Image: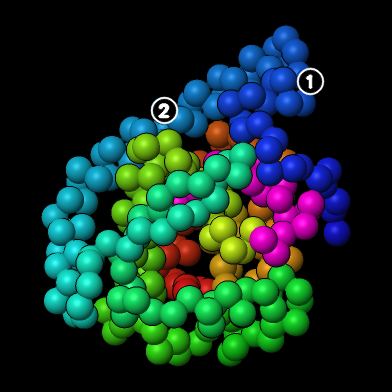
Amino acid sequence: MRTYPPTPVSASCPSDWAARYALSGATADRNATALVAKRALDVLAAGLLLVGLAPVLLLLALAVRISSPGPALFRQQRVGCDGRRFSFYKFRTMYYGADESPHRVYYQQLVNGTARPIGRSYKLEDDPRVTPVGRVLRRYSLDELPQLVNVLLGDMSLVGPRPPIPYEVEFYGARELHRLSVKPGLTGLWQVSGRSTLSFQEMIELDLSYVARWSLTYDLLILLRTPWAVISGTGAC
């Protein structure tokens, strides 16, 4: 397994890659240009998708509101680049006020390597907290669409590691913290490589591979693989 240098949560974000990796001259200029292009792609694509999908978003919000009591949108604190917290949006897929402790316990087992796959996936199968409409939204990742707002605001990128919940980061070691050195993404290498069919350490390996290999071309390749990952539903949570 490839090893990566530990990165503390306080490490700089990609906007400061030149200083962080002691890059100079043409190398630093190329990274800066690529990051500007990445941000431009994020803003353009997220803006166009939000406008184009507005009727769909309204229908999904209505379906969530009708299906069970509670708001259509679920807002939660997540940990982003440099360990900064932000408000993360998605359509609510669980009954309002559902207890988070089952996920917390299972996640700790995932990190410790003691979790057993349920069926073929490392996830809580037949979770009674999830509503019937929520299961459909999760199956096709429709619950994630509001995160286009997070991309537009700059909290997330179209492509990157998934943003963890603060209590999940409490279980991280130095190696896992390195995944926080880039912006989290709406999709990423983990999502197009099997999602929940992979173990926690396999997810970390993919995230660190993305951090090490990032380029705009790599992002575009992951984006091209995303529709099939969504349609196939492999490892959908």
Q: Which residue is mark 1?
A: 22
Residue 134 visible in image: no
Q: Residue at x 64, y 24 (%)?
A: 16
Q: Residue at x 50, y 23 (%)?
A: 36
State the scheme by which the image is colored: rainbow
Q: Residue at x 38, y 66 (%)?
A: 141
Q: In front: 230, or 148?
A: 148
Residue 106, relative to residue 224: is it above or below?
below
Q: Residue furthest top?
A: 25
Q: Which residue is mark 2?
A: 40
**Which residues are the magenta region?**
170-186
- Type of the residue with mark 1: Ala
Residue 161, relative to residue 68: is it above or below?
above
Residue 119 at x, y percent in the picture: 58, 90
Image quarter (top left, top right, bottom left or bottom right) of the N terminus: bottom right
Residue 66 at x, y percent in the picture: 14, 76
- Which circle, 2 or 1, is nearer the viewer? 1
Q: Secondary structure at mark 1?
A: loop
Is 108 positioned to the left or the right of 53 in the image?
Answer: right
Q: Does 174 lie within the magenta span?
A: yes
Is 146 positioned to the left or the right of 85 in the image?
Answer: left
